[in-house]
């Protein structure tokens, strides 16, 4: 049997009353009463982030820092790969001119990138 | 139930007494452990001595969640502003128990580097002597603090803490005016209070 929608009106009223009561409790205990009861002494020393009592090194966890760090990390990986290639090659190098020119080409390729990074000022440390 | 009066079934009390009763039985201690007293503190918290019998077992190592600071050990001059900062960051109302002679008076460290009693920089409620005090001594100190809490009025505690905040404001002003570090500011305030004959800066 299909109920007419009007018969659910008491439930709607009950729902609205429940929402109203919940909101009233939240507002009363979260906004109105604390204004009279809660000790409130906000000041610089109290509001700063807790870093074992010493002044924080940076303001909050959402502090922004320069992406230069990532640049340095990228450059490190670049030259790390170079060294990783150079070392076994140098150990195995038996006056083989073909492999020598190959390595010169490889190093020259990286050198272009190095000169480019230098020219862009990636090697100057800025904050 | 013949002859039962209202006084037999209803307990009347003052609001202040109820609030203080709940405060004294739900102390959340934070250990400011700098020396061997902190080891005795561990014994106090553990099962043999068991501070939870006195409602103070919820250790929090963050000032944001605690209202009882246990200063356990030697505090140097360099640490004085750290102590003040952590005390300022604690939840109100807050109490301080100075544990051991080092915290209470500098103890055997009668040197230029050691703060001669933490009550020079933060308000202390109970002093526990000993070098280090045994766990039951610290518990006795906390019981004494509970007695103190049940006797004090709410306004007394509020003013007590606000007096400290006023000294923190003075410290911040001094730092801003001189452009000095908080260590220099607190040291200067301690020396200045000493030259006035005061033993404290708050």
Image: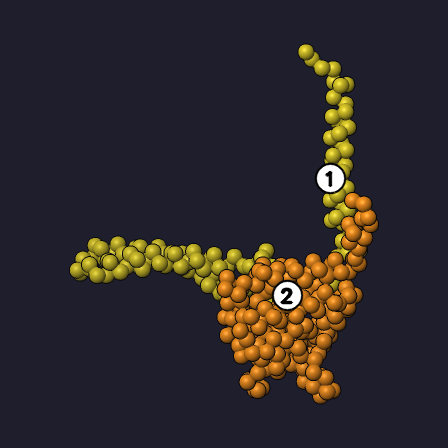
Chain colours: A yellow, B orange
Q: Position of residue A16 (x, y in %)?
A: 76, 32
Q: Quadrant of residue A46?
A: bottom right
Q: Position of residue B150 (x, y in %)?
A: 72, 65
Which chain hosts label 1? A
Depth check: B152 or B112 in front?
B152
Q: Quadrant of residue B137?
A: bottom right
Dot 2 crowding, Cα within 10 Å, few <14, some 14–19, many 20+: many
Q: Are marks 1 and 2 on the same chain?
A: no
Q: Residue furthest front?
A: B2
**Element on which disc 1 rests:** helix
What residue appears at the point 66 percent right and 60 percent down from the top-left corner? B25
What residue appears at the point 70 percent right and 69 percent down from the top-left corner? B148
Q: Which mark is residue A22?
A: 1
Residue B68 visible, this orientation? yes
Q: Position of residue A74 (x, y in %)?
A: 43, 56
What residue appears at the point 31 percent right and 55 percent down from the top-left corner? A106
Dots 1 and 2: beta carbons under 8 Å? no
Q: Quadrant of residue B86?
A: bottom right
Q: Is residue B119 above or below residue B18?
A: below
Q: Is residue A92 above or below residue B88?
A: above
Q: Is residue B67 above or below residue B170?
A: above
Which chain hosts label 2? B
**Element on which disc 2 rests:** strand
Left or right of B174 in this view: A94: left
Distance from disc 1 to disc 2, alpha carbons, whole Å, reads 34 Å
Q: Quadrant of the N terminus of chain A?
A: top right
Residue designated by label 2: B68
Dot 1 crowding, Cα within 10 Å, few <14, some 14–19, many 20+: few
Q: Quadrant of the C terminus of chain A?
A: bottom right
């Amino acid at each position: 049997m299909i109920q007419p929608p009007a018969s659910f009106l008491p439930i709607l009223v009950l729902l609205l009353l429940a929402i109203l009561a919940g909101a009233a409790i939240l507002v009363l205990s979260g906004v109105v009463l604390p204004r009279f009861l809660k000790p409130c002494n906000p000041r610089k020393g109290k509001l700063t982030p807790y870093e074992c009592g010493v002044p924080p090194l940076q303001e909050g966890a959402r502090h922004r820092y320069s992406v230069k760090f990532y640049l340095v990390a990228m450059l490190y990986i670049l030259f790390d790969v170079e060294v990783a290639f150079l070392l076994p090659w140098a150990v195995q190098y038996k006056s083989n001119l073909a492999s020598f020119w190959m390595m010169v080409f490889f190093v020259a390729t990286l050198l272009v990138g190095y000169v480019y990074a230098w020219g862009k000022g990636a090697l100057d440390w800025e904050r | 139930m013949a002859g039962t009066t209202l006084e037999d079934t209803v307990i009347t009390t003052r609001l202040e007494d109820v609030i203080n009763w709940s405060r004294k039985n739900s102390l959340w201690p934070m250990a400011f452990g700098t020396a061997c007293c902190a080891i005795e503190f561990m014994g106090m918290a553990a099962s043999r001595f068991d501070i939870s019998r006195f409602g103070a077992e919820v250790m929090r190592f963050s000032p944001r969640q605690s209202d009882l600071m246990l200063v356990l050990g030697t505090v140097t001059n360099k640490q004085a502003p750290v102590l003040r900062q952590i005390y300022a960051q604690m939840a109100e109302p807050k109490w301080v128990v100075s544990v051991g002679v080092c915290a209470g008076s500098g103890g055997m460290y009668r040197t230029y580097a050691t703060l001669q009693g933490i009550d020079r920089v933060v308000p202390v409620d109970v002093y526990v002597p000993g070098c280090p005090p045994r766990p039951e001594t610290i518990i006795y100190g906390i019981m004494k603090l509970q007695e103190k809490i049940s006797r004090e009025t709410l306004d007394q505690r509020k003013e007590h803490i606000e007096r400290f905040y006023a000294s923190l404001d003075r410290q911040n002003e001094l730092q801003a005016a001189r452009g000095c570090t908080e260590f220099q500011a607190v040291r200067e305030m301690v020396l200045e209070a000493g030259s006035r004959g005061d033993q404290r800066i708050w």
